[in-house]
Image (spheres, rainbow, N blue to C red):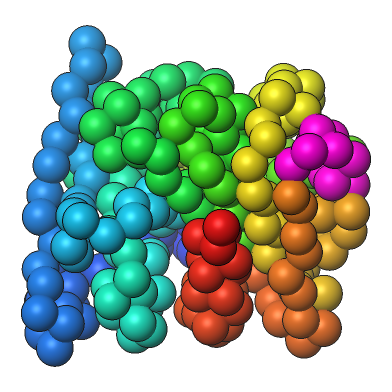
Amino acid sequence: MIGIFIGLIVATNFFSFSASEKDIQEAFANTGFSPEDHYSESTEGKLHYVTVGDPSKPPVLLIHGSPGSWDNWLDVITKTDFLDHYFAIAIDRAGYNKTTLTGKYSLQEQSAFLEPLIHQYCKPCVVAGHSYGGALALQTAKDYHSSVSAVISVAGTVADSLQDPRFYNYILKYTPLKWIIANNLMASNREMMGLEEDLPKMEAGLSGFKGKVALIQGNEDVLVHPDSPAYLKPKFSPSAQVRLFTRDEMNHFVIWSDKDLVMEALAWAHQN
């Protein structure tokens, strides 16, 4: 069993968490749009992101999970009527895909890298994040509350008391396996271990956000505790509009399996 586990770890170096360029082109073939690549530069590297759609439509900043890449949102963008209503700004987070930021960044530091995008596109915008991206979406809403009208956490790793590292997180942090695992999985492991310190800091400032908050969470999610939204709701200001979107049999992979619920949350977020 140990040999099989180590073999799987080695195999991660040959596995991609990003769609191929061919798959991306095929996904957009019938939409009338193509993703445009951009880079936001800092002293620590470049943050890659794409924009898609009509820039006159309401902007939505999309943040992927851990691990992942911008194209994790491909089904939401291309297999719904998303582009009929919204303009997408989808990022590659630090440590993933075409972004060259490779440090051990906290939620707070990752939010800081988004500041140029917030200033350019959010006047205001909706920020949506899946899994770890849900926590970063909330951190972003907290940090740039005047530029974010609503935040959507999709199966987000958002609840400090309910989001404990798994046994494999400790194995990959404290054993020699960390030297042979794929870089993107090592980045994922670091940030998941860092949530213990990052989430209390994020939660402490949520009361300053007065916009809409959509918390999407399935009761069959084995990676994020189903009670996470109930834990998080009291952290917000009474003037914030917080709404839970849920389904009993929904799992963690909502942006693929339940795209219609994501679209429902987006529609609610944009209602006056």
Extreme-top residue of the structure: 43
**Of residues 205 and 212, the one drawn nearer to the viewer in this rendering:** 212
Q: Is residue 243 found left or right of 42 in the rendered image?
A: right
Q: Is residue 54 found left or right of 251 in the rendered image?
A: left
Residue at (27% x, 73% y) in the render: 83
Position of residue 77 relative to residue 95, above or below, is below
Position of residue 196 relative to residue 124, above or below, is above
* Image coordinates for residue 267, horizontal then vertical, percent: 52, 70
* Image coordinates for residue 202, horizontal then vertical, percent: 69, 27
The quadrant where residue 223 appears = bottom right
Residue at (35% x, 38% y) in the render: 122
Residue at (32% x, 64% y) in the render: 86
Quarter of the figure that contains the C terminus: bottom right
| Stretch in magenta | 231-240
* Image coordinates for residue 68, horizontal then vertical, percent: 41, 55
* Residue 14 at least partly seen: no
The quadrant where residue 76 appears = bottom left
Position of residue 199 relative to residue 77, above or below, is above
* Residue 205 at least partly seen: yes
Quarter of the figure that contains the N terminus: bottom right
